Amino acid sequence: MARLVVMGGGVSGHTAATFARDMLGSDHEVVVVTPNSQWNWIPSNIWVGVGGMTKEEVVFPLAPVYEKAGIDYRQAKAVSIHPEGKEDAETPYITIEYTDEAKSGETEELTYDYLINATGPKLNFGATPGLGEGTNLGEHTVSVCTADHAEHASDELEACIEKMKNGERQAFLIGTGHGMCTCQGAAFEYIFNIEHTLNEAGVRDMADITFITNESFLGDFGMGGIHFKMGGYATSSKVFAESLYAERGMDWILGAHVNKVEAGKVTYESLDGEMDEQEFDFAMLIPPFAGVGLKAFSKDGSDMTDTLFAPNGFMKVDANYNAGAYENWKASDWPRTLQNPTYKNVFAVGIAFAPPHIISKPMSSPNGTPINPTPPRTGMPSAMMGKAVALSVVDMMKGKATEPTHTASMSEMGAACVASAGKGLFTGTAAAMTVYPIIQDFEKYPGTGRDLNGTTGELGLAAHWVKHILHHVFIWKAKLKPGWTLIPE
Amino acid sequence: MGSKHVNHIEPYSPQFGTMIPMGGQKFLRTCVLWQIVRFIAINIRMTILILKSHH
């Protein structure tokens, strides 16, 4: 019997663990280590953040699902990896620290034969003084990164709406809270939901809404921009995104590194090096992501974190980390098997793997401050990576292969994104976008770097319906209800 | 089609440099019959995308 340990129970970790469990049978063991007691369908946090859904509608407890599936679930956070074991035992292991009430603070060594790192991001609010989720780190901004954050954001929004109903004008600032943020898509979707909600509440004319972003142009999305096939043109996402903001009378601030948040005010540095300020009554600013801070140790106990992890805390995999300057970047720099090059029984999926470089063109201010989006690798790509790695690991555990048998390169996969504005079945409109491949491949697709037959964008009610269906279908799948394996990632 | 569905856009503002949807486009976005067609199209498109993405 061999043991697979999956660190993380988010989209990629949950996908990897459940598929591995389903395919391994009872001959092998699957363990999930995650500090969370609940699974969260993160895309719907946007709706929670405007009061369109409750927290309970977007989360469910993991324990009963894992018990039913036969997965050994440890509510704990992974602390360190020991890929060579220890001096008196060669079996590799990780150390974990329990977070559940019963065993809180207790530590344990957990051996593994195969390890999948799906720890996701550390929400690095601390990178910008004053940035937070409304409570501990920063009391001046809100967040929609977790269901709890989103619930708090909704309460704050409701308070602003009440003020506007009483004749008090309010300034809304939505976007990224640091020059190195990713997830512009979440802020993009949230601002349109805010605007829609204010319209529904009859107070839109009392609100000034501004988007602040580290993108050098609207519609970069951390992917170097996109060209959509629209109306006979290959239309830039810049035009597509600007049109959405202009139609709704919203302003935007580009190339901004927010470096300080105070009560009612952010200070930011622009790509031209100027320092400026923007006032707000309500601000939802996405934090930058970092690795969760796992350490790695060799057999003799010496620190070898640098061997397993990049400086940003994300795990090294089979990517080309020596690609050099932007002009030299290629689609083939991106990892395919997600296998660690030093320890072949260790993999990383989702946000946890270290990208070879960013996707957007690197930019910095004259002061040397880097201001550019970092690569998005959440949602659909995360789940596809989780499944591909699970299939590879299953083949290796069953002795069918010695090398990974499946690949999930972001340069060979697409992504679908549905950004709603409201959630009504007959009101509001959502943007449905597909991108193929995620990483531009100018050798394979000269011109725009992507397949225009697979890269599209449109607005309409239909996208709302798609988003509703995705919400229910993916929660059904994550709960491992009948037919879950048939639902694609 | 006139421009009655387009709100005032300040000349030379950033908003002035992009495309603005007019009445016909806005109508289609919420026309249920047309959106049913688009719903089917989006689903087909996403299914193809998924099939191309698994290796």
Image (spheres, coloured by chain):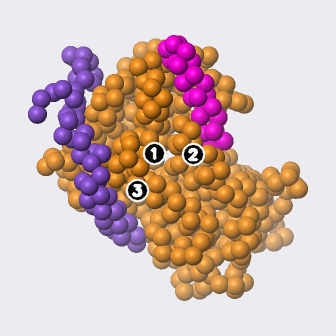
Task: Give the CA distance from mark 3 to mark 2.
Answer: 16 Å
Reply above or below: A265 against A178. Answer: above
What residue is shown at x 70% (from left), y 65% (from top)? Answer: A32
Dot 3 lies on which element? helix
| Label 1 sits on residue | A423
- Identify the image quadrant of the N terminus of chain A: bottom right
Dot 2 lies on which element? loop
| Residue nearer the viewer, A138 or A333 | A138
**Percent from the top left, x then y, of residue A248?**
34, 29
Query: Residue type at mark 2?
Result: Met
Query: Residue type at mark 3?
Result: Val
| Residue nearer the viewer, A352 or B24 | B24
Magenta-drawn segment: A146-170
Is label 2 in contact with label 1 (beta carbons under 8 Å)? Answer: yes
Chain that is purple in the image = B
- B16 lies left or right of A87: left
Disc 2 residue crowd, few under 14, some 14–19, many 20+, Cα 10 Å: some
Is label 3 in contact with label 1 (beta carbons under 8 Å)? Answer: no
Is residue A346 visible in the rendered image? The answer is no
**Residue A243 image-quadrant placement:** top left
